[in-house]
Image (cartoon, rainbow, N blue to C red):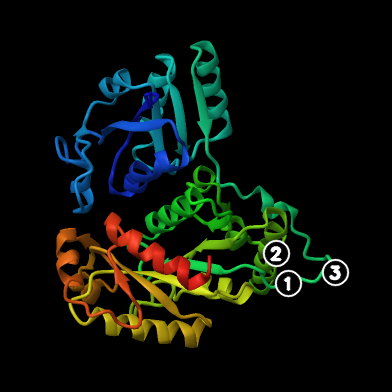
Amino acid sequence: MAMSKIGLTLYPFSKHSLPLLLLFESFVPGYEIKEIVSPKGQGGLGQDAGYFDNRYKSGIVVGDDFRKAIDKTEALIIPEGSMNDYLHSQSLSAIVYALEKGKQVFCFLCVPAETKDYLHHISLKNNSSITFYDNNDELCLRVDLQSDKRIMDPLVPVILIGGLLEENNVFEIFAKTLATLRKKGYVVTAFSNSAYCSLIQAHSLRRVFSSRDLCEKEKIDYIAALINMIEKEERPDLILIQAPDAIIRYSDTVPNGYGILTYMLSQAIPIDSCVCCFQSYSGNIEKLAQSISSDTMARLGFSVDFVHLSNTIIDNNILLEKRIISTAKIDIKQIDRALEHTKGGIVPVYNMIDESQFDAFLREFCCKIGI
């Protein structure tokens, strides 16, 4: 007889926390998100969670009262957010309420040390528990750039998952691929800059990229030494890396960061294969994929071998007027219809949000890298 899963409430819910809703159970077995709550005034009340991103229905409807939701479940998840976020105080109120009710709390919110101590005190008083997830970058402290040990190229395939825009489901596809490969029994060493690194058991490169004590050349050396050290310790079947920014510049007038961090990463470690997440495109997507692949090979030394076509669109009026990238989401079924007309180009294109298409991608992916 299957054991019932521990019920979870996710608050505050938004389109940015959709990957947490969809993937939490893959990394923390025995739990099930049963309630999601959007802050009052944010919209979406009574809608399916998929409404926030114009994707397939999830089967979970959005509520607007975190107290009622917490009362119905055994645990609470607080997604990432900074101390300057206007929802920070509401998130703390939900944490205090859950702890006083004897619930378990998973917290990805950025919280100062004194607040952590206060919340731990409440949890002890009420026989509840709270787990704070940090960026998981403590291994960075162990790298010695002065060591005379030779840094070797990895002995296993190195796979990069990135996007032309960070809004193109990059983290979701990265975490979904990671979870599925591990479930199949592969040992995967993972690197990401996401706030959810600890949850998905990935190493963070955030501290290296943001360091003010290292010049750019030293950051590249540091990353190479770090990956080399971790590969020796974990002995993985492959290394999976989430690109730290958009992999290439968007255009001459709107560079979108120029892909500088990904360029530094490509200099630190040879990339064997790349999965690239595209925004929706009205033209020939297969021709675009081949063009981008040629560009990354010339600029970064690796080709794009697989494409995920997201339902993200760019507002061209804002792009032309303000020279900034503003995005929205179209109905994901439009992506499915667009892919029906693809003919199977050199670079295969999928909608990896769809489970059957993701499975097809993963079969080709495993064959491509030889695992």
Residue at the disc numbered 2: 228
- Amino acid type, mark 1: Met
Mark 1 crowd level (few <14, some 14–19, many ≥20, 10 Å Cα): few
- Amino acid type, mark 2: Asn
Is 14 placed left or right of 172 in the picture? left
Residue 369 lies, in percent from the top left, at 51, 71
Q: 109 or 136, which lies in front? A: 136
Residue 367 lies, in percent from the top left, at 46, 70
* Quarter of the N terminus within the rendering: top left
Residue 284 is marked as: none
Residue 350 lies, in percent from the top left, at 29, 67
Asked if residue 124 shows in the view, the reply is: yes
Q: Residue at x 60, y 56 (%)?
A: 207
Residue 322 lies, in percent from the top left, at 25, 72
Mark before the other along the chain sequence, 3 or 2: 3
Compute the Cα span from label 1 to label 2. Answer: 7 Å
SS of the residue under disc 3: loop
Q: Above or below — where is 63 with respect to 234?
A: above
Residue at the disc numbered 1: 152
Foreground tag (3 vs 2): 2
Is 299 placed left or right of 228 in the picture? left
Residue at the disc numbered 3: 148
SS of the residue under disc 2: helix
Is 359 placed left or right of 334 in the picture? right
- Amino acid type, mark 3: Asp
